[in-house]
Structure formats: C-alpha cells, structure tokens
Amino acid sequence: MGPDYSARCRAVEAFLSKAKSVLFVPISVDVYGRVMWPWNAQKIDPIGQHLEGIARIVDVVSPMLYPSHFVEPELKADPYGTVLRTMRHGKARVEVPLRPYLQAFSMAIPTEMSLPEYILAQIKAAEESGADGYLFWNPRADYSSLWEALNLAQKERGP
C-alpha cells in the first residue's frame, strides 16, 4: 500500500514520551481524523501519527473529525455517519479516552443542512459512540452556530 513510515511514528512518540517525562501533567494530543481508521495501524501514513503508539503514551487523544476534511464525498456529506464510524474504528483499536474535535464551521456541509443541524448530527454521533466528551473548532473563532445548535438541543431535551 505504500512505504513504511515507522521512523516518523517513532519520532512523534519519542517527543510525546519526553514531554510526559518532564512535564508531570496529563498529556492530551490532537491527531488527524484519518489516524482512527484501521489502515493507520500499518504505519503507512506519512504524517507519522500512529494511534496505538500515541495512545500508549498520552492520557487523552482528540482526533480532528471534521467531515469536510475527508476526501471521500460520502464522508463529507454525512456528519453523523462519519463521526460515528471514525470513533468506532478508534475505540476498537485503543482504550485511551477519545475526545474528538468536531466541525463548527461551514466548509463543505451538505446544502440541505444548516450548520447548527450539522453540528448536532456530529454531537449525536460522538455521544452514541461513547466519546469521552467532545471539543469544537472554528478557524475564525466564530462559535455563534455552535451556540445556536446547543440551544436547539436544549429545547429538544426539555427542562
């Protein structure tokens, strides 16, 4: 399938081990969402992020599960399915807590969904997958749609 990038994985893991040994604090890292997929276990990803290796060192892994960043059109178009499938892949591979970053920006969202609906679909998938919480990212630090989504969720759940 491609070259072996074990040396890059070892470099990332050595850095994390060193940081943990000198900082004496819980370590949380974010990784690309694709790191959660099964093919990543083969260490053929040139970014050098190997889920099992990283999970042996850190206390929490936060995969960036932005559906818009996947190449496959079906993953871009299905925020619920993308987050759910990706989290299930990761949870099958490691026991460390997984706390995903979710997409709170409008890049490549399906035309039939509003951004708050898109956010809610991701939240539902994260919760159903057993995620250890979740985080949000917006490159402009504009979280107004996130607040709108959270208000909608609160109204749906009732008092």
Image: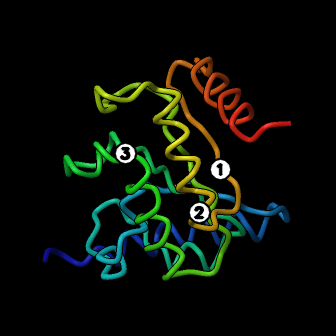
N-term mark: 3 or 1: 3
Q: Does 73 sit above or below residue 32?
A: above
Q: Position of residue 99 (x, y in %)?
A: 64, 58
> Which residue in the protein does label 3 denote?
67
Q: Quadrant of residue 45?
A: bottom left
**Disc assigned to residue 128:** 2
Please report contact status of discs 3 and 1: CB closer than 8 Å, yes or no. no
Colour theme: rainbow
Residue 125 lies left or right of residue 99; in this view the side is left
The amino acid beneath tag 2 is Glu
Point 52% across, 31% down: residue: 104
Q: Quadrant of residue 62?
A: bottom right
**Disc assigned to residue 23:** none
Please report contact status of discs 3 and 2: CB closer than 8 Å, yes or no. no
Point 41% across, 65% down: residue: 85
**Disc assigned to residue 134:** 1
Q: Which structural element holds mark 3? A: helix
Q: Residue furthest left?
A: 1
Please report contact status of discs 1 and 2: CB closer than 8 Å, yes or no. no
The residue closer to the viewer here, 51 or 154, is 154
Q: CA distance from mark 1 to mark 2?
A: 12 Å
N-term mark: 1 or 2: 2
**Crowd class of label 1 (few under 14; some 14 to 19; many from 20; radius 10 Å):** some
The residue closer to the viewer here, 142 or 113, is 113
Q: CA distance from mark 3 to mark 1?
A: 15 Å
Q: Quadrant of residue 1?
A: bottom left
Q: CA distance from mark 3 to mark 2?
A: 17 Å
